Amino acid sequence: MESNRYALELAYNGTDYAGWQRQPNTLTVEESVDTALSTILGESLKIVGCGRTDAGVHASYYVAHFDFTGDFPPAFLRRFNRFVADDVALLGLQRVPADFHARFHATSRSYTYRISLRKDPFRQDTVASLPQMAGIDRDAMQEAAGLLLDFTEFAPFCKTKSDAFTMKCDLSVAHWIFTDEEWTFHITANRFLRGMVRLIVGMCLLVGEGKMSLGEVRRALKNQVRLPKPWSAPATGLYLSEIEYSNKKEWFNL
């Protein structure tokens, strides 16, 4: 029997996971999803995710694909969500074209970073609690974010020992939204480098504190060299929030 390709639409709290990608001797989101899927469908399946998220990073929207030859049991979404851990949720199941690839066919990805300006014991794992930042220069932070849109290569915001084949990223959104109690950073690009968003958030905060100048950021980007004082913001505040596909109109909701 010929197999069909399907896309899983997921959300997860990454606090207790060593990231998305399966690794030996540690729990990952991929392993949790793969185990639930294979158990319910009675077949060893291999899922392919839209990208890797680091340890402790969350996703409010994530896409993975897999191939399956059989029929889905009744109320599959409900059964999957009962079986999988409480910090993972299946949002939807779609039949997709046979050549669909969750990673390579994504046209853009969006991340959101959330900062709480007060200590919140109920969200300590899902926002970065940074009350000490409340008085820093928000205009400078916004200017630092906007500066990114003038560049196409981002080596200063890539973790060392990266296996990326290019530092080029096509950014279309990079801005902050400020309220009295919470700050949110939004960024969208066709692709991201390893650790890129957290390093960008850290840079914006350092600029806001006056510990790094916009001139230093501009020079690092122009020369594609390491920032003088790189800081990676905590993983707890970071969410993969949207994945766009040009052929999404061809998906069939099951």
Image (cartoon, rainbow, N blue to C red):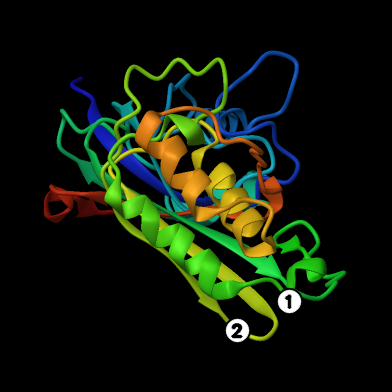
Q: Residues within 10 Å of mark 1 (few under 14, many from 20)?
A: few
**Residue 36 vs residue 182, the one in the foreground:** 182
Image quadrant occupied by the N terminus? top left
**Point 74% across, 68% down: residue:** 133
- Using the rendered image of the protein, determine whether residue 70 is visible from the camera's viewpoint: yes
Please give the residue where the numbered disc 2 appears in the rendered image: 179
**Point 32% across, 34% down: residue:** 153
**Point 67% across, 35% down: residue:** 55
**Residue 42 vs residue 115, the one in the foreground:** 115
How many numbered badges does the structure rendering display? 2
Amino acid type, residue under disc 2 in the picture = Thr
Please give the residue where the numbered disc 1 appears in the rendered image: 135
In x, y percent, where is residue 192?
40, 38
What SS does tag 1 mark? loop
Q: In the displayed orientation, state which residue is furthest to the bottom.
A: 180
Q: CA distance from mark 1 to mark 2?
A: 13 Å
In x, y percent, where is residue 208?
63, 64
The numbered mark at residue 209 is: none
In x, y percent, where is residue 16?
75, 41
Amino acid type, residue under disc 1 in the picture = Gly
What SS does tag 2 mark? loop
With 185 as the anchor, is 205 left or right in this view?
right
